[in-house]
Image (cartoon, rainbow, N blue to C red):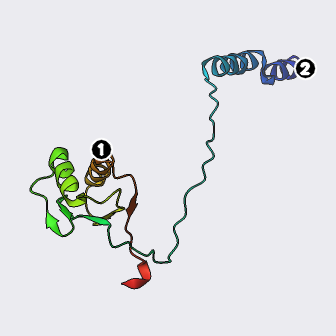
């Protein structure tokens, strides 16, 4: 009989230390976790239509090739500097009052070249700008 009593005591498991460890882990994770609130910004994206826009005869066309070179009305600008591009835009603008600027960039052209063209046009006073695209069905 003594042997059976001893085995029962040996088989019982004390859960108090296990509960203490789990409780300490829970406290540790609660203290070290940072809660940040992420906000969502709702924006309304512009839409483009596939209807062709009638181009006015007095518009300026700025073409950017895949190497980032600028062409204004099919004439190559001698370099890609902002000041050179502004001078070329002023010359091409001539006496026309605020002609629309159409920027046609190659799909492989650097993004910086497009931004430079838009910045140069804005600094010259040409505020009506559009970016030419091609319909995928027209290939």
Depth check, front residue: 29 or 50 = 50
Task: Locate the C terminus and report the quarter of the image it occupies.
Answer: bottom left
Asked whether 106 or 128 is in front, the reply is 128
Near mark 1 (Cα within 10 A), the count class, few <14, some 14-19 or many ≥20, is: few
Seen at 54% across and 59% down, the residue is 46
Determine which residue is flagged by label 1: 123
User: 59 above or below 87?
Assistant: below
Left or right of 127: which side holds 78? Answer: left
Query: Could you tell whether 86 is left or right of 118 in the image?
Result: left
Residue position for label 2: 1
On the image, which quarter does residue 77 sit in? bottom left
For the question of whether residue 21 can be seen, the reply is: yes
Would you say the residues marked 2 and 1 are in contact, meaning their CB atoms lie under 8 Å apart? no
The image position of residue 110, as x and y in percent, is: 26, 55
For label 2, the crowd category at 10 Å Cα-Cα, with few meaning under 14, some 14 to 19 and many 20 or more, is few
**Would residue 135 appear left or right of 62 to someone viewing this image?**
right
Give whichever of discs 2 and 1 has the lower sequence position: 2
Identity of the residue furthest to the front in this view? 95
**Whole-percent x, y for residue 14 in the image:** 78, 18
The alpha-carbon separation of the residues under discs 2 and 1 comes to: 102 Å
Position of the N terminus by quadrant: top right
Q: Residue at x 42, y 77 (%)?
A: 135
Q: Is residue 85 above or below residue 133?
A: above
Front residue of 20/95: it is 95
Q: Quadrant of residue 72?
A: bottom left
The one nearer the camera, 63 or 138, is 63
User: In the rendered image, is residue 14 in sight?
Assistant: no
Q: Secondary structure at mark 1?
A: helix
């Amino acid at each position: 009989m003594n042997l059976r009593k001893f085995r029962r005591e040996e088989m019982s498991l004390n859960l108090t230390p296990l509960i203490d460890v789990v409780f300490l882990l829970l406290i540790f994770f609660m203290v070290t976790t940072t809660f940040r609130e992420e906000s969502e910004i709702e924006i309304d994206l512009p839409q483009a239509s596939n209807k062709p826009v009638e181009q006015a005869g007095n518009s300026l066309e700025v073409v950017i090739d895949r190497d980032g070179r600028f062409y204004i009305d099919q004439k190559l600008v001698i370099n890609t500097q902002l000041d050179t591009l502004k001078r070329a835009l002023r010359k091409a603008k001539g006496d026309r009052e605020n002609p629309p600027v159409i920027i046609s960039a190659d799909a492989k052209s650097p993004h910086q070249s497009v931004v430079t063209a838009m910045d140069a046009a804005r600094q010259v006073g040409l505020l009506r700008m559009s970016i030419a695209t091609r319909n995928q069905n027209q290939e």
